[in-house]
Image (cartoon, grey):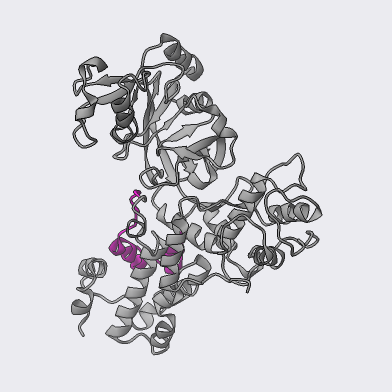
Amino acid sequence: MRLADAVAQSPGLADFYGSNGLKPIFMGEAGAARRAAVINAVAQAESHGLPAQRYHMARLMVLDAEGGTSVDAELAFAKALADWSHDLGGGVLNPQRIDSTFKREVLRRKTGDVMREFGASATPAAVLEGLAPKDPRYQILRNALAPANRLVAPAGTPMVPEVLLREGAQGDAVLALRTRLAAVGFDAGGAAQPDVFDMPLTLAVRSFQDATGLPADGVAGPRTIRMLNHGRGEANPAILVALERMRWMTGHDLNARHVWVNLPEYNARIMEGGHEVFVTRVVIGKAKVDFETPEFSDEMEHLVVNPRWNVPRSITVREYLPRLQANRHAVSHLDVVDGSGNVISRDRINFGQYTAANFPYRMRQKPSDDNALGVVKFMFPNPWNIYLHDTPTKHLFDQSQRAYSHGCIRIGRPRDLAFELMKGSYDDPQATFNRALESGRETYLNLRPTIPVHLVYFTAFPDESGQIRYYSDIYDRDAKVYAALAKLGVASAATDE
């Protein structure tokens, strides 16, 4: 087969070879360093959590030993390079095909561009190394795949007796469970009575079970305790998925100032220069169809102080219309408005004649202390109408599990978040915000420059100190990603049986 015919089947290869006049870059002595670079790169596949067999390294080694003298050799190495560039530089999976709640565009480099850089470089190996995510947390996650780092507690950490432990249990076994979980990254937080099995400990056990492929029931039975006491022999599914998710973030500058909301962690952060400068608890969407908070990236453009709440139509027709049909004066804190925004008297409306499909009105709440959006919302306009906002329902931030909203993200420290985000846009952020608040009017405060916002989903992720923390797979999204990775041949989880 001629090279022209072979590469025509791949747009990326056709782009590259079309631009270089179909000159081979892997054949003969001239291509030896490039062949070695590709072989050495794909030999690291498992350390990145990628499916090694996808790159056919054994065949590449045979072709290299033969001197790479054939068109078949050129094509095999070019195909391996293209696949490696695609997978390491943006993920081996197409996330939108796995989970409809994943809305972020994966910003991959074009195959032809990578191959042009690779072919022209005096250090082709460095080009391939540069494809991996540059965020240092990727390397921390990658290091966790090493056999020496697979959920093994430090020497001297107390072993947990193999007895059944569940919420409400008390004693030394519970204390040992709490201590050993913390030692492998599943910290249940400070407890007034550390020898009592409380809700935070239940959540920590559940997160550990999620991370190790065990049924996540929050009960520490013999299988869970054996896994905790002895570690695992194979790769951690949560780490494998986290590496893939980090590859999906390629193309986003995570060293620049940005807002980072890790949904399973129930926290929002402002990151700058790779470090946390602000953190607050959040409430996210319920673990129900149509309520889950999606994953995407966008630009925060402005804040709205004293916001009106324009009730989403889904909430209006599903929750409020039935109540209005039973009592026209229900949900009296909300105005009924027409398509032009005019408030309509409820006495003029026969709510009973409408259905969810043909209800012609909208509902809106005026700015107030008990407005559902609180005193401020943070806007990064998107097709899913997701944003960050204050809330009058403060007690939910005291809960360990905080998935209660209809999809938007409620902020535990909204004013402090506003002050921090306004730095760089306003000389005195706090005074500017307070003037807008005291006016009682809906007020827009623009952010210049805009600030990237990343809504992400990591059940395993390094904290500020570099220690990997684990969280429950609240939306069962990691399970889908791991199943897809396993189907491609990524190292499977051990079961401790």
Q: Which residue lies furthest to the top in this view?
A: 439
Q: Quadrant of residue 193?
A: top right
Asked if 263 appears above or below 46 in the picture, the reply is above
Asked if 335 appears above or below 121 in the picture, the reply is above
For the residue pair 147 and 493, the one nearer the viewer reads as: 493
Left/right of residue 265 with respect to residue 75 in the rendered view: right
Left/right of residue 396 with respect to residue 205 in the rendered view: left
Q: Give the magenta part as a residue range.
A: 103-132
For the residue pair 15 and 180, the one nearer the viewer reads as: 180
Query: Which residue is located at x 46 percent, y 45 percent?
Result: 254
Query: Which residue is located at x 38 percent, y 51 percent?
Result: 251
Q: Is residue 88 magenta?
A: no
Query: Which residue is located at x 36 percent, y 71 percent?
Result: 81
Measured from the top left, where is residue 246 in percent x and y?
Answer: 46, 55
Asked if 40 appears above or below 135 in the picture, the reply is below
Measured from the top left, where is residue 426 in percent x and y?
Answer: 44, 20
Q: Can residue 441 be seen in this view?
A: yes
Measured from the top left, where is residue 132 in percent x and y?
Answer: 45, 60
Which quarter of the figure is the C terminus placed in?
bottom right
